[in-house]
Amino acid sequence: MGREGSRQSGVDKGRARARLYARLGRRRRPRAGGIVRGGIGRFGASRPWATLRMERGAKEKNHQLYKPYTNGIIAKDPTSLEEEIKEIRRSGSSKALDNTPEFELSDIFYFCRKGMETIMDDEVTKRFSAEELESWNLLSRTNYNFQYISLRLTVLWGLGVLIRYCFLLPLRIALAFTGISLLVVGTTVVGYLPNGRFKEFLSKHVHLMCYRICVRALTAIITYHDRENRPRNGGICVANHTSPIDVIILASDGYYAMVGQVHGGLMGVIQRAMVKACPHVWFERSEVKDRHLVAKRLTEHVQDKSKLPILIFPEGTCINNTSVMMFKKGSFEIGATVYPVAIKYDPQFGDAFWNSSKYGMVTYLLRMMTSWAIVCSVWYLPPMTRETDEDAVQFANRVKSAIARQGGLVDLLWDGGLKREKVKDTFKEEQQKLYSKMIVGNHEDRSRS
Amino acid sequence: MGNEASYPEEICSHFSSDEIKRLSKRFKKLDLDRSGSLSVEEFVSLPELHQNPLVQRVVDVFDTDGNGEVNFKEFILGTSQFSVRGDEEEKLRFAFSIYDIDKDGYISNGELFQVLKLMVGDNLEDWQLQQLVDKTIIVLDRDGDGKISFEEFSAVVRGLDVHKKLVVIV
């Protein structure tokens, strides 16, 4: 723990500040733009008081405090199978290989090492569970590695629980209730008006007002950047997906047409009311499977310039906000202007990720409403269109990289659907193909058999 | 699963207790059915490992008692061979055992063929593979017994800085 000794005064000041912030549940203004690091948060060099206290306590009791690795972005140079195997073959001998030998015993090193690296820590499965924080934010749900250290800390935590559940939660539930009922009632009423400018005007403001009430209900503190790039009519807005709250966050700052499946229950009531006031695109369950039908309806919507921009989450599932996974190409084939949006949550005040295999919707919403706050940054990126020599997949990847870069997220090529499904064998076959090209490439050049 | 605090003493590996804690956490995460040992299916549930053609061999090498699954002790001992503090001899032995399927101390023609087949899949004809295998054995087999012993293996592979190549940070 040498770090503590070298920055004494800064740490003390930081500790006092952090203590204050932790108690009040407030946060410092995040830097606009720039790379956002999950885990360390924005307290700079000093870590929050709670963690420092724990580390000190652990040292006193003489046992190790396990800390997960920082989720900083370490960009690995992407090297191909061929380059790495050549590197292995070449090392140790100073002469350059003029005719590459066909097969070397050392080729297995590449696969073994890659395999071991994956066993230690793989890039994919950790995206489907909540991010592990390096410092504790006084919520027991994010307390993976810290044990009981001191009475003072427990009292503080207990106080936090009291405030969150008895004071904040009822307030938030009341607000949420108000917001949703206003949305349903408001949009239904607006729906009875004749179509025209007045109806649109009212509809927009009813939607915006209700979403803003819901935002308050979650105590979401949102910072919008580059608002001049906000999506316009006839465009498609794409964003990375962390939770259903993303919709509320984006819709409280702009007027969008939603796309989604028709649900039953409360969601269904809300959906039916909303579509009376303005044309959202809701699909029946059976229609979702039919990709052409979906594409057709979206294209029709987009080509009508008077219609609102569509809001789509191309990952298809919730990812834990440390990375962006494969974008499904469907929305990129339509040919409309794409407005990318990057959303990054600050994990210090509450974990917004919806782990749908672990929690249902109601439990999730309760957890959201009993966190300190939902703090996030939204960046509106400049619009992108598909170039003539790009296909939909390349375009989707380009948009994905832009979003990942802005939000400080890891850009992955893996499919978010791997949360529920097994990976296909085609990946292994690809690797085998690459390798066999390496060892056979020279084989075909040989003149003698 | 047993009392973790006792592991550092029981299992002599190259790891510090901090690293062993991390490994045990990882082990628990990989053990989806909480059986206390990892089967090949549980390894292969990692998408990046599924695409690795040698995963079956690596699991077999880890599985020293041959029951088809890797328990915690085998896991620690196995990954210890990839530790930064491991020596070259250990890593060479690991690489050798990837090829030596029946663990008899020699890489036979058939074993080399099988491992190559895992790595190339269906992309090469069997006769092409057999040619490669025969050629490799002729070149490397010094004592003429038709198989590659550990000494013959090391002679070829030793100069390749293997202690840097077969290293994984825990």
Image: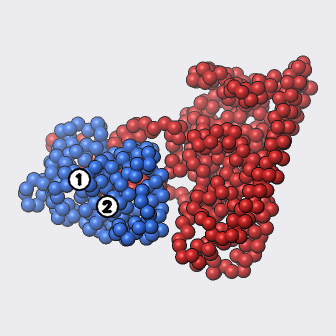
Q: Quadrant of the N terminus of chain A?
A: bottom right
Pointer 2 local density, CA inside 10 Å: few below 14, some 14–19, many at least 20? some
Q: Amino acid at mark 1?
A: Tyr
Q: Chain of mark 2?
A: A
Rendering quarter of residue A362: top right
**Dot 1 corresponds to which residue?**
B99
Color used for chain B?
A: blue
A123 displayed left or right of A100: right
Q: Position of residue A213 (x, y in %)?
A: 84, 41
**Dot 2 corresponds to which residue?**
A90
Color used for chain A?
A: red
Q: Chain of mark 1?
A: B
Which one is in front in this view, the residue at disc 1 or the one at disc 2? 1
What is the distance, in whole Å, between disc 1 and disc 2 at their CAs? 21 Å
Co-location on one chain, circles 1 and 2: no
Q: Secondary structure at mark 2?
A: helix
A231 displayed left or right of A291: right
What's the residue at 41%, 46% (across, down)?
B42
B142 displayed left or right of A109: left
Pointer 1 local density, CA inside 10 Å: few below 14, some 14–19, many at least 20? many
Rendering quarter of residue A316: top right
In the depicted view, which residue is nearer to us: A412 or A190?
A190
What's the residue at 82%, 52% (across, down)?
A167
